[in-house]
């Protein structure tokens, strides 16, 4: 299985073990983990295990996070994409969730929005999802803004007890809302 998406500036592809060094740069940065429970990884082996878990998700669920690569250089920038959640979160199970995590030097350039739009398009057009959820720490206003720009709406809040007791926004977009957003952006 080889999943591949392309945007104006990005290549989104399956995570590979060769991405471990980039994942370590990403997930060892305390600033990247500021809104994620402040638990950056301590060694590359943790990143290898994460990549192996995501690769297992590709086979079990037909989808998982993508590596985000800069199209012009091929540099690893982080991850993005759709995950099929099979464990209960906020009283929901077996649902699609969109997310991303980007290396700090790439922040502020619109890559999160660009990759999220591509991920949502993939969810609705390739996975045939009826709805996609998003989760953000309520204090992470920039991530909230990215998801809202992509059409997700905050529909509630919850404390993510399984993940360091983080108080989170619960966002959602339906297939109908996505289609309407796409029409508005083209008009």
Image (cartoon, rainbow, N blue to C red):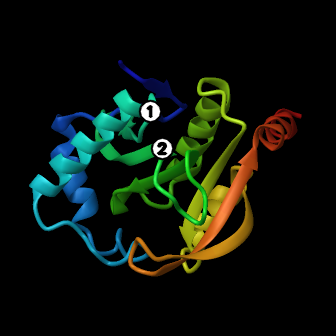
Front residue of this view, candidates 82 and 88: 88
Location of the C terminus by quadrant is top right
The quadrant in which residue 40 appears is bottom left
Which residue occupies 55% across, 45% down?
Answer: 94
Find disc 2 in the rendering and name its residue: 83
Find disc 1 in the rendering and name its residue: 61
Does 35 sit above or below residue 8? below
Task: Estimate the x, y position of residue 123 in percent, counting from the top left.
Answer: 61, 34
Distance from disc 1 to disc 2, alpha carbons, whole Å, reads 8 Å
CB under 8 Å between discs 1 and 2: yes
Which residue ends up furthest to the top in the rendered image? Answer: 1
Residue 13 is left or right of residue 151, and the answer is left
Res. 103 mark: none
Task: Estimate the x, y position of residue 132 in percent, counting from the top left.
Answer: 65, 46
Label 2, secondary structure: give it: strand
Of callouts 1 and 2, which one flags the residue occurring earlier in the amino acid sequence?
1
């Amino acid at each position: 299985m080889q999943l591949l998406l392309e945007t104006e500036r990005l290549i989104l592809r399956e995570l590979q073990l060769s991405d471990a060094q980039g994942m370590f740069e990403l997930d060892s940065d305390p600033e990247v983990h500021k809104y994620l429970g402040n638990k950056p990884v301590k060694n590359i082996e943790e990143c290898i295990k994460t990549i192996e878990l995501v690769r297992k998700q590709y086979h079990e669920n037909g989808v998982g996070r993508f590596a985000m690569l800069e199209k012009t250089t091929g540099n690893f920038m982080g991850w993005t994409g759709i995950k099929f959640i099979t464990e209960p979160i906020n009283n929901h199970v077996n649902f699609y969730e969109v997310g991303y995590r980007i290396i700090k030097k790439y922040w502020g350039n619109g890559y999160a929005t660009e990759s999220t739009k591509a991920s949502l398009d993939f969810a609705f057009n390739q996975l045939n999802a009826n709805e996609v959820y998003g989760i953000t720490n309520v204090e992470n206003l920039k991530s909230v803004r990215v998801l809202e720009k992509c059409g997700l709406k905050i529909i509630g809040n919850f404390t993510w007890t399984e993940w360091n007791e983080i108080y989170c926004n619960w966002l959602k977009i339906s297939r109908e809302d996505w289609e309407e957003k796409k029409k508005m952006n083209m008009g």
